[in-house]
């Protein structure tokens, strides 16, 4: 079922014929062995690896058992996405949106089934563990918010708009729409597909194709 492309430290792993980056699997399961990924979590892993596929995976995701462990996994993904500072910010923004959407779909009206009564010692140990995890989550969320604020302050909006309007066919209003949809640089825009651009208000097939053509020519 599980196969590394080369070895345990490979960048990619293959699960049920689908490739995942090892990093996202480790974030989901909390840095443990890849083999510990629950099989019924695969639709969620696929949606987080490829956020654009989320709409097509919703029916399978809704069948996944709702557990506190799963919710903590989704929170880890959200924190990781917020803390990323590398060049692929557009992807992590989409991944963050996917993780938040999945959490809302599964846990908005969470009703956990009553568990069997445990011994007081077991209950106390579990409560201590959950409290420690919650404190860690709160601390990381605070760090994420601080880091996100720093990132946003790095490039002023007017500079982004100015850069985007250098593309043929992109005026200030269209650049504003691109900015609102998470495209904060020409380099980030290069990762967009024609279908993704067409989904933006005011950008039809002709303009989407023109933007992609301009991106190929941009920077010579």
Image (tube, rainbow, N blue to C red):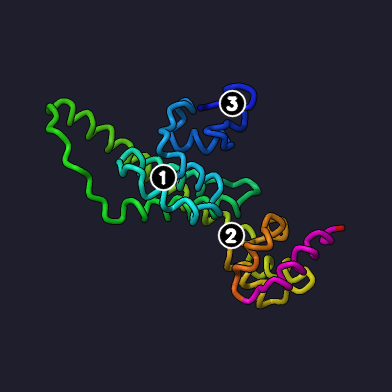
In this rendering, the answer to whether 219 lies above or below 22 is below
Q: Quadrant of residue 120?
A: top left
Q: Is residue 204 magenta?
A: yes
Q: Is residue 215 magenta?
A: yes
Q: Secondary structure under badge 1? A: helix
Q: Bounds of the magenta span?
A: 202-219
Evaluate if marks 3 and 1 touch, with contact meaning CB atoms under 8 Å apart: no
Q: Nearer the viewer, residue 99 or 166?
A: 99
Q: Nearer the viewer, residue 63 or 218?
A: 63
Q: Which residue is mark 3?
A: 4
Q: Earlier in the sequence, mark 2 or mark 3?
A: 3
Q: Is residue 12 left or right of residue 134?
A: right
Give x and y (percent) for residue 96. 49, 52
Q: Please give the label number shown on residue 153.
A: 2
Q: Earlier in the sequence, mark 1 or mark 2?
A: 1
Label 2, residues with CA under 10 Å away: few <14, some 14-19, many ≥20: few
Residue at x 56%, y 54% (from the top left corner): 52
Q: Please give the label number shown on residue 168.
A: none
Q: Mark 1 and mark 2: span between their CA atoms?
A: 27 Å
In this rendering, the answer to whether 4 lies above or below 178 is above
Q: Quadrant of residue 207?
A: bottom right
In this rendering, the answer to whether 163 lies above or below 84 is below
Q: Please give the label number shown on residue 74.
A: 1
């Amino acid at each position: 079922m599980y196969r590394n492309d080369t070895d345990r430290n490979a960048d990619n792993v293959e699960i049920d014929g689908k490739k995942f980056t090892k990093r996202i699997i480790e974030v989901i399961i909390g840095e443990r062995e890849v083999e510990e990924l629950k099989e019924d979590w695969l639709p969620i892993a696929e949606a987080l690896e490829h956020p654009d596929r989320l709409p097509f995976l919703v029916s399978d995701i809704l069948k996944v058992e709702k557990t506190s462990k799963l919710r903590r996994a989704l929170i880890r993904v959200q924190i990781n996405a917020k803390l990323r500072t590398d060049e692929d910010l557009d992807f992590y923004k989409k991944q963050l949106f996917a993780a938040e959407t999945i959490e809302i779909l599964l846990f908005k009206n969470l009703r956990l089934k009553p568990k069997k009564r445990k011994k007081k010692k077991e209950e106390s140990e579990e409560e201590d563990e959950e409290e420690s995890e919650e404190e860690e989550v709160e601390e990381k969320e605070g760090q994420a918010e601080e880091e996100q604020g720093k990132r946003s302050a790095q490039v002023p909006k007017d500079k982004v708009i100015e850069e985007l309007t250098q593309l043929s066919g992109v005026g200030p209003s269209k650049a504003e729409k691109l900015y609102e949809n998470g495209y904060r640089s020409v380099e980030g825009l290069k990762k967009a597909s024609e279908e993704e651009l067409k989904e933006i208000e005011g950008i039809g097939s002709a303009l989407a194709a023109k933007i992609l053509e301009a991106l190929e020519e941009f920077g010579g």
